Amino acid sequence: MKLRIILSLLLLGFVSQVLAYDDDSYAYTSGSTYFEPAFYIGAQGGYARADEGSALKQLADYIYGLGGTASKEVRQGGFGARGHLGYSIARFLAIETGYSYFAKNRYEASSYVSVDSNNLNIKVATWALDLVAKVILPINDFSIYGKAGAAYVNTQFNDDANNASYRHIAIRPTYGVGIGYNINNNISIDAVWSTIDGRSQINDMNAIDSKLDKVTPTCRLYTLGLTYKFIGF
């Protein structure tokens, strides 16, 4: 619901910008900034989480809870990044493609009770390529924007305890919102939240073996970024 409200406000700003746009010239100023259609590149970094469900953590907790000589390490989320290339069609509209890296999730647990042993050692690696449209609401040197499109998501499950590997590829919807600030005509900074909707997450540890090759995690990025626009060349 909150996302719908934000996108509705951005759409309202988009319409107002279209109505106010000067057809006589692509290049114009607003506040202290100058605009013209141009390509841009950028990079963002921050916290990332690819959520494939709770089943693997459940299994790690279960194995550790068997007692005996036991150990456990669970890592979910961490550093993530996105690089992007785009084209500003108008001050209120851009097309953008990007590559996103998400921190690996790691699930390790072992338990040795008498002659019985149980081991878990699974790593989950996810990356994505996306193509999105950005609707931008400029406010002097600041801007608020929403983006939406599709993402090609590659997920790899490496089960080292059983010498097995599972890979799943899917096309999933992606969307996000951001706040930007123009330092000058070429350079801007922004703070962005973005997500890729997952599919077939595993929340039952008894279903892990049958679903590892079908999972697309829900992927989220919370980042700060820097963008360079090719103006004035």
Image (spheres, rainbow, N blue to C red):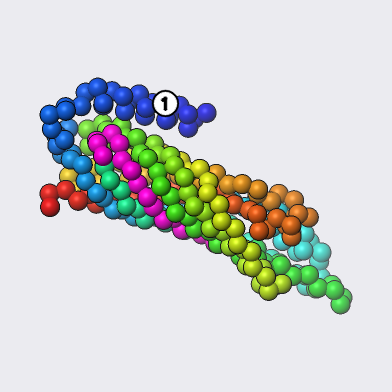
Instruction: Give 59 or 27, whichever is nearer the viewer.
Output: 27
Q: Is residue 38 magenta?
A: no
Instruction: Give 6 or 129, whichever is nearer the viewer.
Output: 129
Q: Which amino acid is tagged 1?
A: Ser
The residue range painted magenta reads: 89-104
How crowded pointer 1 is (Cα within 10 Å; few <14, some 14-19, many 20+) is rated as few
Residue drawn at 64 percent across, 64 percent down: 166
Per the image, the residue denoted by label 1 is: 8
Instruction: Give 210 or 10, whichever is nearer the viewer.
Output: 210
Q: Position of residue 225 (x, y in %)?
A: 34, 51
Q: Is residue 68 above or below residue 198?
A: below
Helix, strand or loop under label 1:
helix
Q: Position of residue 139 (x, y in %)?
A: 26, 31
- What's the magenta bit mostly, secondary-structure-wise? strand
Residue 80 visible from this viewpoint: no
Q: Is residue 127 left or right of residue 147?
A: right
Residue drawn at 85 percent across, 74 percent down: 116
Determine which quarter of the picture holds residue 56: bottom right
Residue 199 visible from this viewpoint: yes
Residue drawn at 17 percent across, 45 percent down: 185
Q: Is residue 85 left or right of residue 51?
A: left
